[in-house]
Each structure stands twice: as structure tokens, then as C-alpha cells.
Amino acid sequence: MTDPTTDTGAPLKDSAHYLHAVTQLAETRPVVAQSAIYSESGIKLVDQGMRIERRLYERLVQHTLREPLDTHLSVEGAVTTASLIAAARALLESAVLPQRLAQTLRVPASLLAPLTTMPLPPSVAFKLTLMREQRPALWKHSLEVMLIAMYLARRAETSERDCVALCAAALMHDTGMLYMDPAWADPGHKPVGAQRKQLVVHPVTSMLMVRQAQVYPRSVETAVLEHHERMDGSGYPRGITGAAISPLGRILLLAEVVAAIYEKYEDMPALQLSLVLRLNHRKFPAALTTALLPLLDEERARDSALMPLGAHASRHLETLADAFAEWERLKGTLANAQQAASASLALTQPLAFIDMRLGALHKVLLESGAHPSQQMALLSQLDGDAAGLAEVSFVGKEALWQLQTIVNACERRWPAPLASSPPADRAAHAWCDWVRSRL
């Protein structure tokens, strides 16, 4: 049986945002057409040897191109194997976590070794150059993910061949973001509902970009596609569970989360990462997580003692407790009115989906001692304990983030219901609106 997500034969079409980024790149360094560029209908749009300029954007965006644009282009100062190694080495010397990971290895240079044999065809070099020049934060993120993934692979005794494949997957995993509106990179940009579908698609776009290069094994495509999956099936784009996620995909999904947390939290990232991994133990591969947690302990203990964060801990816990209570109230209202009950609904419907995901969150919090009722009792005993207050605060923030992901997933699957929709659907979205108003 084939998977329509991975076995699609549809070619990837250059988006308007990607074309715009290419023409912007041409404003800062020479970009030249190595061969003529044609539209799908056979119209010549750019002659061989012509330098790309921003004014070409309007012409290009009006047509569907016969082949991907970057297969025809060269750029001055493009990414090379040597420049990749130099950029990764510089990051090892400056970024906190990669530096710490390298120090724990007997041969730190092994984190960079796969780069020396990784295929780097011109079209991939162009994409990485575009990322480096137009989306520097994304470029840095990709390098960090690569280094973290290499560390996890070394700890898992991954073969050299698979390390090379993983190296390519890590560098390419977010190239699909180049096809999206740059506004997604703005922390203040908070898409909701159907808008989030664009984000869910980017692993598929990245996978197709890898496939276009025609030099990487299928394992690279698969790992790229899986970098937002989760072991418990709560990830995307396919929502597959641990047994279905490839070995390289498991490494990549954890490396991506680790890098993202260190990028997002300037203060006390080790504490935040430790809590995320412990509170979400069903989401991440256990053996790989075990390899990371001990490395975080020293930094976690030092940082949590420096920054008491108890000021917001109580508010976070109250919001979470209220969200659980509001959900039970809504379900009770529906049951009492004999209009609908979650137990009788199919799992594809919003009410049952939220009930399942919220129940899973409730269980995880109880098992880890992080349920609001447990944490509120603990809070009263932590007066003056900076490290303890910091951890409680982070527990609350992480739980609220998970609450937000439930809302996002529901709204992505089922856009806002019409007035004529079943009461259960309207109730589910009313709860989502309530949660948004409190976060």
C-alpha cells in the first residue's frame, strides 16, 4: 500500500514567496540563468546567460514554470561543502548547546565528518544559499538541528552512511519554509484556524525539494517529512505513531525540538527543555531523550537558581485548571440537554477530538506530578525557593503551550462551524475561543 503523502507524483511548483526571495537575492549578489527558463506552456521567460533582476519577478510570478527555477540558476558565493563545514564549526564554537554536546564526545570533529561526503548538487546549494542570505535565522536553525542530530546519531551508534543521510535531512528539513510568507518568521505573527494549514504543509514541501535534487536516498525524504511527527501520533503532517516513524525521522524530530527551544527561550533554556522532554515523554523517543537529559542537569540547576519565576506560576496554573473545568462544564451542558455526549461521537468530530487530547494531557500531568492541583499545593511550600518556583512556572507555561496546540489542531481540522452546525461542534469551538481569550 502506498502513502499519498510520500508517493505523490505531482511536481513542486515555485511559490510567489520563493520567486520573490530569489529576485531579492539577485539584488545583493549576481544570480545568472545557466540555461533558458520556459513557462509550462513553452514561453521563453529568461534567456540563457541573463542576470536575474527584481523586475523579473512580475514576469515569473504570472507563469507556471516548466522546471523549478533554481535548477537553472547559479549564484555568486554559493554555499559549498567547505563553507558549510566552516559555518558549522563556527556554530560549535559559539552556540551554547552544540558546544556542550561536542565537549561530551571523545571525537568532537565527528559531528562535522558527514558533511565532507554529503552530496551537494547545484540546486541544493542554491536553496541553502538563499536561506543563508534571505532567512539567516532559518539558516542558523538548520545548522543547529544538523549538529544536534549528529550528536544523537553518534550516541545511537548510527552508521556512517545513515549519518550522511541524516546530515542532508537536517540541513534541508525546513527548506519548505522558503515557499511561505516571511511573516511566519515574525514571533508576533499568530495564524489561527485554516491559516495554520500552510505551516502543516511545509514538511511535505521540504520533502519534495529533497526529491527534486535526485541525489539523496529515500530515507532523507522520509526523515524530512517526519520532522514534526510525534511518537504518540500527535504530530503532523501524517499523525503517525512511533512504530511508523523512521529511525532517522525520530532523531530529526527530537533534534528539531531541542534546537527550537534553545532558540525560543533565551533565559533558562535547559530548564525549559528538560521539562518539555519529561512532561512529553510519550511524544519523543525514550532512548534518545535519555541521552540528552543528563547533559541538561548542571545548566538547569545553575540557571533556575538565578531567576525566580514564581510571579506568574499561580496565574498559569489557574488558567490551566479553568480550561479543564470549562471543558467539563461544556460537556455537561450538552449531556444534560440530551443533544450530544462525547462518548457517542466519532473520534473525527471536534468534541471527541478535544476530549481525547485533553484527557491525554490531564493524564500526563497527573503522572508527572505537574497537574494544576498538585502544583498549586507545591507552590504554597516554595516561598523563597527560586529554583522550585522557576520549575513550577515553566511547568505551567509548557502545559499552556500544549493546551494551545490542542486548540490549533482542532481549528486546523475543523474550521469555524456555521450556525446550522451540530451543537457539539459549536460547543467545541466555543471552548477553543474561550481558551484563546485566556492565553
Image (tube, helix red, strand yellow):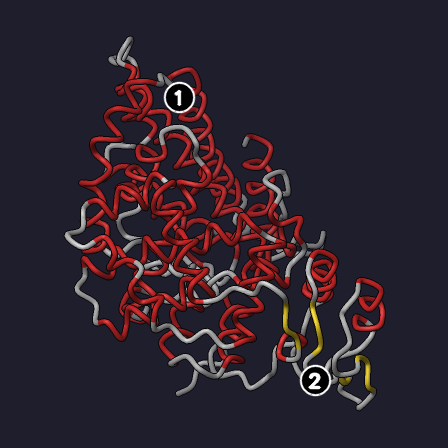
Under mark 2, the amino acid is Ser
Picture coordinates of residue 90, whole percent (x, y) = 40, 48
Residue 45: name its quadrant.
bottom right
Is 99 placed left or right of 103 in the picture?
right
Q: Mark number for residue 35?
A: 2
Picture coordinates of residue 272, whole percent (x, y) = 35, 35
Picture coordinates of residue 34, whole percent (x, y) = 68, 81
Numbered-mark total: 2
Question: Residue at (66%, 56%) from the top-left corner?
Answer: 421
Quick one: 253 or 107, which is closer to the camera?
107
Give above or below for 11 relative to 116.
below
Q: List the residue tagged with mark 1.
A: 313
- Dot 2 surroundings within 10 Å: few (below 14), some, or many (20 or more)? some
Residue 110: name its quadrant.
bottom left
Give above or below for 9 relative to 164.
below
Quick one: 235 or 88, which is closer to the camera?
88
**Which residue is outermost to the left?**
106
Mark toward the viewer: 2 or 1 = 2
Dot 1: element:
helix
Under mark 1, the amino acid is Ala
**Rounded to the nearest whole Å, what is the CA distance between mark 2 and mark 1?**
60 Å
Is 70 placed left or right of 237 in the picture?
right
Question: Residue at (39%, 87%) from the top-left corner?
Answer: 1
Give above or below for 72 relative to 1.
above
Residue 438: name its quadrant.
top right
Question: Residue at (64%, 59%) from the top-left corner?
Answer: 180
